[in-house]
Image (tube, rainbow, N blue to C red):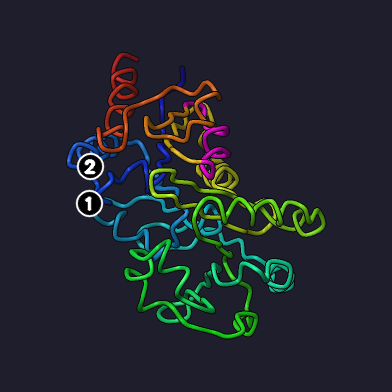
Amino acid sequence: MAAIRLIAIDIDGTLLNSSFQVSEANRAMLACAHERGIEIALVTGRRHTFALPIAQSLGFAVTLISSNGAVTRSSTGELFHQDQLPQSVARRLVEYMTNWRDYLVFTFDRAGRGALVVEKVDELHRSIQRWMEKNAEYIEFVHPIENSLTADPIQAMFCSDIARMQEAEAHLRANTALLSSITLLKTQYEARDLCILDILNDGCSKGHALRRWVEHQGIQREEVMAIGDNYNDVEMLEFAGLPYLMGNACEALRHNGWPLTLCADENGVAHAIAQVLGGNQRR
């Protein structure tokens, strides 16, 4: 097995525990990998600004692939790549998904208020209240939400309980013309009865963004380790030469044959990396 040169790690449900914290064990193991010259990339569905405090808390510079692969920046702010959802496609999406507009959030590449746009707040507060409160200073209310599309958004996001989002996903997948213009990614947490549908530009995913970055760095896929827990991590895990699935991962992902580490509350990231670093030591 090739020596690992880059470790790509999902944030929510993977690096963070159920208290939304990076454990000391995870932090120490990442620092150890960094000291050995292994690059750390955080690859997340969070937008860059919301993920940045997690990256900064590690104490060293990392690569930050955010919005499910739509934006790749260093944790010090240098932009490498951005893949936006065309306005025309976003407008078709809103028109077709009009019955779910109360659950819709648009993300834009802006500082401050207007980085996130919603039409109404009640339904979103029911499903993602903590996220809404943490991002309150960035949220702008626009009615109708189509009026916000004066620039290409980074992505669209629908959030609600699992049953409602299953209906939304089925409706969206029935429109083959629209589906051919987008990437549809899902993140689902059964214990919280929460499902998030992310709509990005066609060909945009964590896996695509990770491939683009490692090729730029001259790293082979066999030299990439990836750790994730959810449906939106699949492309990243499929790309990595050494994929690890969290112990708290969705049941449906356990049938892919990927090695299983411990749960997020059991320092699963540290456990997986320790196994790899031990292997690197022996080489």
For image coordinates 29% across by 60% down, the residue present is: 53
User: Which of 204/212 is in front?
Assistant: 204
Residue beneath disc 1: 59
Circle 1: residue type:
Gly
* Residues rendered magenta in the picture: 231-242
Please indicate whether residue 267 sits to the left or right of residue 105 in the image: left
For image coordinates 57% across by 32% down, the residue present is: 238
Query: In the structure shown, which secondary structural element does the residue marked by tag 1 occupy?
Result: loop
For image coordinates 38% across by 69% down, the residue present is: 132
Name the disc covering residue 138, or none.
none
Magenta span dominant secondary structure = helix
Badge 1 crowding class, 10 Å Cα cut-off, few under 14, some 14 to 19, many 20 or more, is few
Please indicate whether residue 183 sits to the left or right of residue 226 in the image: right
Query: In the structure shown, which secondary structural element does the residue marked by tag 2 occupy?
Result: helix
Q: Is residue 234 one of those drawn in magenta?
A: yes
Where 80 sits versus 223, above or below? below
Find out whether the residues at labels 1 and 2 contact each other: C-beta distance under 8 Å.
yes
Name the disc covering residue 27, or none.
2
Q: Position of residue 100 (x, y in %)?
A: 61, 67
Quadrant, the C terminus:
top left
Q: Quadrant of residue 122?
A: bottom left
Q: Position of residue 138 (x, y in %)?
A: 40, 77
Task: Please report whichever mark, 1 or 2, sits nearer to the chain's N-terminal start.
Answer: 2
Q: Position of residue 94 (x, y in %)?
A: 68, 71
User: Which of 51/1 is in front?
Assistant: 51
Q: Is residue 263 one of those drawn in magenta?
A: no
Q: CA distance from mark 1 to mark 2?
A: 9 Å
Furthest-left residue in this view: 24
